[in-house]
Amino acid sequence: MKPWRIGILGFGKMGQLRADMFLKQGNCEIAAIYDTVLPENPPFPVASSQEAILNDPSIDIVVICLPNYLIKAATIRALEQGKHVFCEKPPAMTCADLAEIAEVYRRSGCTLMYGFNHRRHAAVMKMKSVVDSGHLGRVLWMRGRYGKSVDAEYLKGWRANKEMAGGGILLDQGIHMLDLFLFIGGQTFDEVQAMVSNLYWKTEGIEDNVFAMMRNRETGMCAQLHSTMTQWRHLFSLEIFLEKGYMVLNGLKTGSGTYGDEVLTIARNRSSVPAVTWENEEQHEYPVDESWSREAAEFLAALDQKDSQSHGTIDDAMAVMELLEAIYENDAHVSPKRFAELQS
């Protein structure tokens, strides 16, 4: 079978990681890469421009790992050229931008997948399976904390530029936790309260902390998020509390190891108080991160029509972007004028 020929726009850390993961699937080849800054002795053919990749009729797939402000145009152009697209998060800077992408996508007949790899971590997959089984009842509430430490070097890159990034820690990292809330909870949130701040780094339009509360009015399911770049240590924690028990994921297995071990605790309530003791808990540890490979395999399966795409769809992307924008919009400390400035 002829291998899928892939062009990669943006060959930094993520572009290199995605290249490795697609090559590991065995039926892909990297036809060309493009970036304004490339590693010494690039391992693949280098295109002269983005357009050279987008216009190359021999390239079947475009992998987009570009700064946020370049994502929309590249995605639309690739789809218009009849190419399948795998795109890193965020899917766009705004819901309006994503709606434009969606319109082109639905006409294209191509596959479009967004890289929300946290869904494909083994511990998260286990949590989702427990919720879907109904063994612990319905989800009552969720709490997520996702934080990292950055230094002054961060302020020198495009992520600290509002025009290029579109937002701060929420759009950059907290979006993953919002996606997990939607994925595991299986519901949207139509009530949002939030506090967004940049008290420490004080970069205009780039928040360094977000505290958000969300609720589904019909079911009452709630979620609480803290997304931060003043954690001073990397941290990932996701808690799911259900009618008959709970699940707590502390740590997330990554290549850098900065978020610690991926350890999931599951416990079922007892009928008497205290409902749970430490002895009732069971722990599962997942020492290997296979999320990237799982995403690549699912994307290629969708191309081969062996399986329907179930993650990273345009609908998933729109749902998380709508929730993200609702958080920005409902910031209790942002005046209407200031909000308009942030969205401009």
Image: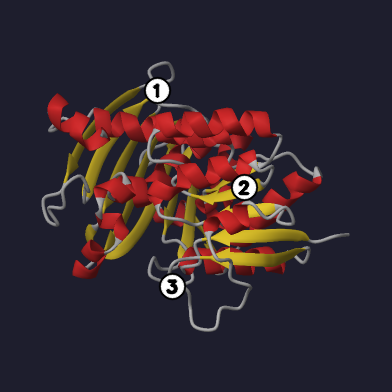
Answer few, some or many: residues within 10 Å of disc 3's Cα (few below 14, many 20 plus, some between 14 and 19).
few
At a point 48% along the width and 43% down the height, the residue shown is 73
Identified by mark 3, the residue type is Ser
SS type, badge 2: strand
Callout in the foreground (1, 3): 3
SS type, badge 1: loop
Residue pointed to by mark 3? 256
Residue pointed to by mark 1? 216
At a point 67% along the width and 41% down the height, the residue shown is 111
The N terminus lies in which quarter of the figure? Answer: bottom right
Tell me the distance, in whole angstroms, between the alpha carbons under discs 1 and 3. Answer: 36 Å
The answer to whether marks 2 and 1 mark residues whose Cβ atoms lie closer than 8 Å is no
Residue 286 visible somewhere in the drawing: no
The answer to whether marks 1 and 3 mark residues whose Cβ atoms lie closer than 8 Å is no
Residue 19's spot in the image, x, y percent? 61, 66
Q: Earlier in the sequence, mark 2 or mark 1?
A: 2
Tell me the distance, in whole angstroms, between the alpha carbons under discs 2 and 1. Answer: 32 Å
* Location of residue 193 (image quadrant): top left
Callout in the foreground (2, 3): 2
Q: Nearer the viewer, residue 19 or 330?
A: 19
Answer few, some or many: residues within 10 Å of disc 2's Cα (few below 14, many 20 plus, some between 14 and 19).
many
The answer to whether marks 2 and 3 mark residues whose Cβ atoms lie closer than 8 Å is no
Residue pointed to by mark 2? 85
At a point 75% along the width and 46% down the height, the residue shown is 303
Q: Earlier in the sequence, mark 1 or mark 3?
A: 1
97 lies above or below 237: above
Residue 33's spot in the image, x, y percent? 58, 66
